[in-house]
Image: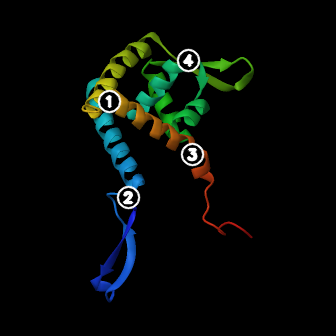
């Protein structure tokens, strides 16, 4: 399905131009799903647990990789350093995350969940996976595997996307 269509703009003297066809433009779907998912998750997590979606992302990554630095969280989940720093500070203040100095580099702080952080994680993961099941309701196991495969392929292209420049742009 093409991602653009021809559109005549009456206010512009009837000039035709290509415009996005949102029904076929993949970034539209990815953005709409991601933004709606994040906003609704954050609202729900704040109401129930007092943390937003960014804190949940930090918590989930620390459950997967205990004892990592904030920079590693940024790398894995693609959040900017400021957002991760604010979330870590809030989680430390709430007693859900503990910081310790890296024995190999005294300038680096390593992060891990505390017992209350793990308890929060366990409550959050139950809600997060229930929301995932609801969104994928009606998909067969094969369709879920296909969707995950497609998303993995897109995810693998992210380094190229970060560096992408249209032909000739950025050359001197």
Image mark count = 4
Q: Quadrant of residue 69?
A: top right
Q: Are marks 3 and 1 in contact (CB under 8 Å)?
A: no
Looking at the image, is mark 3 or mark 1 earlier in the sequence? 1
The residue sitting at 33% across, 35% down in the picture is 42
Report the quarter where the C terminus lies.
bottom right
Determine which of the numbered discs, if any, sits on residue 132 in the image. 1
Q: The residue tagged with tag 4: helix, strand or loop?
A: loop
Determine which of the numbered discs, if any, sits on residue 157 in the image. 3
Q: CA distance from mark 2 to mark 3?
A: 21 Å
Foreground mark, 2 or 1, reads 2
Q: CA distance from mark 2 to mark 1?
A: 27 Å
Looking at the image, is mark 4 or mark 3 earlier in the sequence? 4
For label 4, the residue is: 66
Q: For this rendering, which residue is in front, 79 or 4? A: 4
Foreground mark, 2 or 3, reads 2
The residue sitting at 38% across, 70% down in the picture is 19
Looking at the image, is mark 2 or mark 3 earlier in the sequence? 2
Q: Quadrant of residue 12?
A: bottom left
Q: For this rendering, which residue is in front, 21 or 111? A: 21
For label 2, the residue is: 1
Q: Is residue 13 above or below residue 106?
A: below
Q: Position of residue 151 (x, y in %)?
A: 46, 39
Q: Position of residue 71 (x, y in %)?
A: 61, 33
């Amino acid at each position: 399905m093409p991602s653009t269509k021809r559109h005549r703009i009456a206010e512009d003297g009837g000039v035709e131009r290509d415009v996005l066809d949102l029904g076929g433009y993949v970034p539209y779907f990815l953005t709409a799903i991601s933004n709606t998912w994040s906003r609704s998750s954050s609202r729900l997590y704040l109401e129930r647990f007092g943390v937003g979606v960014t804190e949940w992302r930090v918590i989930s990554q620390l459950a997967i990789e205990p004892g990592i630095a904030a920079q590693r969280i940024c790398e894995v989940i693609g959040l900017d350093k400021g957002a991760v720093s604010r979330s870590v500070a809030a989680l430390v203040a709430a007693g859900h995350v503990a910081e310790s100095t890296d024995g190999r580099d005294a300038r680096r702080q390593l992060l891990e969940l505390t017992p209350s952080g793990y308890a929060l994680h366990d409550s959050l993961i139950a809600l997060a996976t229930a929301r995932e099941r609801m969104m994928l309701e009606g998909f067969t196991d094969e369709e879920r595997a296909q969707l995950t495969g497609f998303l993995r392929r897109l995810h693998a292209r992210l380094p190229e996307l970060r560096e992408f420049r249209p032909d000739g742009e950025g050359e001197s």
